[in-house]
Image (spheres, helix red, strand yellow):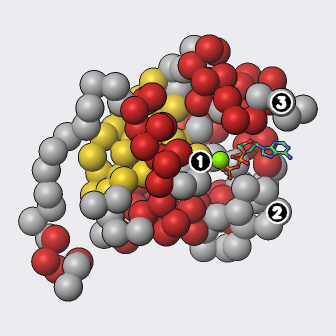
Amino acid sequence: MEQTFIMIKPDGVQRGLVGEIIGRFEKKGFSLKGLKLVNVEQPFAEKHYQDLSSKPFFPKLVDYIISGPVVAMVWEGKNIVTTGRKIIGATNPSDSAPGTIRGDFAIDIGRNVIHGSDSVESARKEIALWFPEGTANWQSSLHPWIYE
Ligand code: DAT
Ligand code: MG
């Protein structure tokens, strides 16, 4: 089953949005496979966002991610990378539809509350980076009520 890496950014933690965000993924029917609250070190944040290292906003982005604890998660479900990105909404909250997490809870691009992997390949890399210890192995007993 497909997995994705989801991170609630420091603003989402500070603003008390952790339960709300987890609830949206749970209620959709996705399964939580890994979860931890972590203070990220600068080199680790730079590694997570290494593909963006040439962008002018990169230093600000790294400062933001290390400004407080983040909630790092692995979620699992059918087509979860694409569907997770839809639940999260467009990168810039000005463009995020109401009903999405960023559309409902964010205003500025530099405080957009949540990260989600953008492809199955980046999900694989991000899960390996954030959860080198591995994730939990379980299956929801609701599986037959969610999948046909
Ligand atoms: P996403 O987080 O939707 O995958 P991304 O990977 O392109 O978007 O960029 C990572 C983060 O960097 C994004 O959540 C917010 C910030 N960012 C992206 N583009 C930006 C820009 N033009 N100006 C300022 N911050 C930006
Ligand atoms: Mg991205």
| Residue at image location 75% in from the left, 35% down from the top | 52
- The Cα–Cα distance between marks 3 and 1, rounded to whole angstroms, is 21 Å
Circle 2 crowding by C-alpha within 10 Å: few under 14, some 14–19, many from 20: few
The image quadrant of residue 62 is top right
- Residue where numbered disc 3 is placed: 54
Most extreme residue toward the bottom is 148
Q: Which of label 3 and label 1 is nearer to you?
A: 3
Q: Which residue appears at 66% of the width and 32% of the height?
A: 49
The response on whether ligand 1 sits within 8 Å of label 1 is: yes
Which label lies toward us, 2 or 3? 3
Query: What's under tag 3, amino acid-wise?
Result: Ser
Q: Position of residue 87 (x, y in %)?
A: 54, 66
Left or right of 83, for residue 92: right
* 124, 66: nearer the viewer: 124
Which label's residue is closer to the chain start, 2 or 3? 3
Q: Which mark is residue 114?
A: 1
Residue under label 2: 94
Q: Position of residue 37 (x, y in %)?
A: 41, 29
